[in-house]
Image (cartoon, grey):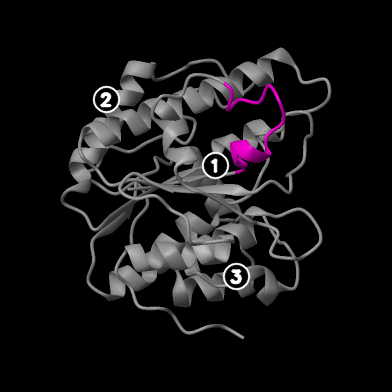
Amino acid sequence: MWIALDGVGHPLDAPAGSAWEQDLPALRPLVDRGAALDATLGIAGQPQSGTGQCCWLTGQDAVRIMGEHFGPHPGPTLQRLLTRHSLPVRLTQAGARVALTNHYAPAFFEAQRRRARLGCFPFSFQAAGLPLNPSGLPLVSASLGLDYRAPWLEQTLSLTDVLTLGTALGRCARDWDLLVLDLWFSDLLGHAGRDPTPGEVTRAARSYLVRVDALLTGLLSSGAEVVLSSDHGNMENLRVKAHTLARVPLAASFTAVSGPGTVVHGGQWLSAWAGLPEADREG
């Protein structure tokens, strides 16, 4: 199971009083045992989801290919890269069983019919010929049960529900080669930050990490192998509204991660974990 956080910098680069500073008995030890990866790749500007997630999904330097940090959605250049080299595409071509476990509401598909603007994860799975909202799996809302609107209070799932959902996902993972969850909601909360930070924003960010912790607890209790990553910094510093230059986590439940140094290396590490050979590099 690959949990892909969006816009959550590593706690080592978070300011005092961040959402990381609370009791997260499953999540924090996992992250602390992992690596803190550079997301800037030596290019000026704020890292973005389009290029950052492409790095994770392909193991290639999407920032160098674009010549800049780009996002949030992949344009034609990044779409070509994902179509050729993304993890879902390559695994499907190798005969593996893979699925994106996000739940997409009817409003999402209606919006796509009006203007197609898929993020990197749903685009990659569709490029692999795989459906969104796959049948036979417990699907997960990216908000993990919080309302999508401020003040982002609990709406659909209790913490116990989230833990139960994690356990169910972990059991299903035994029959799949890779399940992926794109938790983009953390970036939405990060963009609500400012100085001084409103109390409702701080509470929502803290609540969200508690829910990620509950989901992870359920996954681990089922015996699932779990990898956790993030594409760029944001929610770890709610004193600013924009993305940050913070390093990002790569962690695994089954091993200490120490080799990768950047998000490109993180993507290469993911491909190797999934059993794929190194892909040809794009110019």
Residue found 59% across the figure and 61% down from its top: 262
Q: Which residue is mark 3?
A: 78
Tell me the kind of residue under disc 3. Leu
Q: CA distance from mark 3 to mark 2?
A: 36 Å
Label 1 crowd bin: few (<14), some (14–19), many (20+), radius 10 Å: many
In-front residue for pair 199/261: 261
Tell me the kind of residue under disc 2. Thr
In-front residue for pair 137/266: 266
Tell me the kind of residue under disc 1. Trp
In-front residue for pair 88/203: 203
Whether 136 is drawn above or below 278: the answer is: above
Q: Earlier in the sequence, mark 2 or mark 1?
A: 2
* Residue range (magenta): 7-21
Pointer 3 with pointer 1, Cβ within 8 A: no
Q: Nearest to the eye among marks 3 and 2: give it.
A: 2
Is disc 1 placed on a helix, strand or loop? Answer: loop
Q: Which residue is mark 1?
A: 184
- Asked whether residue 112 is drawn in magenta, I would say no
Q: Earlier in the sequence, mark 3 or mark 2?
A: 3
Q: Which mark is residue 209?
A: none
Whether 68 is drawn above or below 27: the answer is: below
* SS assignment for the magenta stretch, majority: loop
Label 3 crowd bin: few (<14), some (14–19), many (20+), radius 10 Å: many
Residue 271: horizontal and vertical position, in percent? 39, 67
Q: Earlier in the sequence, mark 3 or mark 1?
A: 3
In-front residue for pair 12/215: 12
